Image: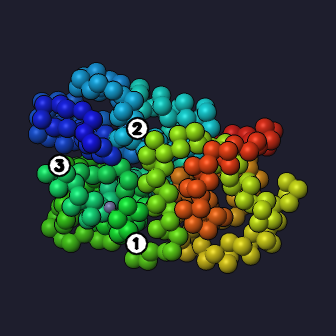
Amino acid sequence: MDTTTIDDVQIRHAEPFRAFLQRRGRRYDKKSRNRRGDAIKRLWVLPSRLYKYAEELGLPSVDAIIEQNTLFPCLSRFLGDADQGALIRHHLFDPVDMISQIVGLTASLAPTLNWAPGICLDCQSEDMRTYGHTIWRRDFLLPEVRWCGRHNAPIFHLCDACLRRFATGTHFDVPLSRCPCGQPLALRAKTIHRQEREVALGWQRLLDSAFAPYIGSREMAALINNRAAELRLIDDKQISWVRCLDFFGSQRLRGFSNSIGFRLAGKPLQNALLGKKCPRHPIHAILLLVALYGSWHAVEELLLDRSACLEELDDEMFAEEDL
Ligand SMILES: [Zn+2]
Ligand SMILES: [Zn+2]
């Protein structure tokens, strides 16, 4: 679904806002390209100054851009009110200091960026049929996402040299079925773990702002806490490390969790299981939910059952974690 028309370049549903600027700037806005150069180099994953762009470019709805062209619909579900407010301010106005840390996107595998453009070849074919051209997709901007849940297909990415060009500000308008240098695309992960597909399903579902819009970090924290109690990973507000070791060990999660920089140990896990704070990083949080409930499908059923998510958490238990 197209959201906006500017000249004859339309912003597409799920196209990162920066990718749209790039597409438009290259073809129609050569004069202002230099002026906007700095902005284009900023993270695709956390665009800022949308309000200014909307005004300059005559975009009718900043809300629609945030919902359809940023990661906000998913990121916001794992943030407390204050952090969510900071993310909205960052998207609408000037960049907010430490925004990557605030939204948990620091556990990056890439040295210079906490994002990298990924490609699902099936999404690409679908976009060709729908639009007559391909688009970059917000779904695959996080390097920790290595599977397309919609198509049950692996994610590809660019070679190191072309990725470095992205990191230094030379971006490519649209993805192709080969790397821009002409080499074949590389698989983002050589090993796809069992839970990876489940996590991808969850990530793509939560990016849809129409899906269970009442779900925020408090509800996510409650879901994690309830299940941890059912599994007796916690008992009387104490964590049982022995049972945790046993439970997470039996799930064979270590390979996957290590590969996305999520340690299933220590204070972050303790806080999550006790219902104090769910992990900020969306992929870490989704992995924890999938691990506890066994599948994304089981988590999704609970998220759709509003009453299951609204079981009261002790207010004193739930506290926004300091950075
Ligand atoms: Zn796909
Ligand atoms: Zn290349």
Tag 1: residue type? Answer: Ala
Q: Secondary structure at mark 2?
A: helix
Q: How was this image coloured?
A: rainbow
Mark 2 is surrounded, within 10 Å at the Cα level, by few (under 14), some (14 to 19) or many (20 or more) other residues, namely some
* Residue 57, quarter of picture: top left
Find disc 3 in the rendering and name its residue. Answer: 131
Horizontal side of residue 42 vs 307, given as left or right:
left
Q: Secondary structure at mark 3?
A: helix
Find disc 1 in the rendering and name its residue. Answer: 189
The relative height of residue 265 versus residue 268 in the rendered view (above or below) is below
Residue 137 in the image: state x and y as whole percent: 31, 51
Please give the name of the residue rendered at 47% of the width and 28% of the height, measured from the top-left corner: 89
Residue closest to the eye, 161 or 5: 5
Labels 2 and 1 touching (C-beta < 8 A): no
Numbered tag placed on residue 67 in the rendering = 2
Residue closest to the eye, 303 or 74: 303
Please give the name of the residue rendered at 11% of the width and 39% of the height, measured from the top-left corner: 27
Residue 253 in the image: state x and y as whole percent: 60, 73
Residue 41 in the image: state x and y as whole percent: 30, 42
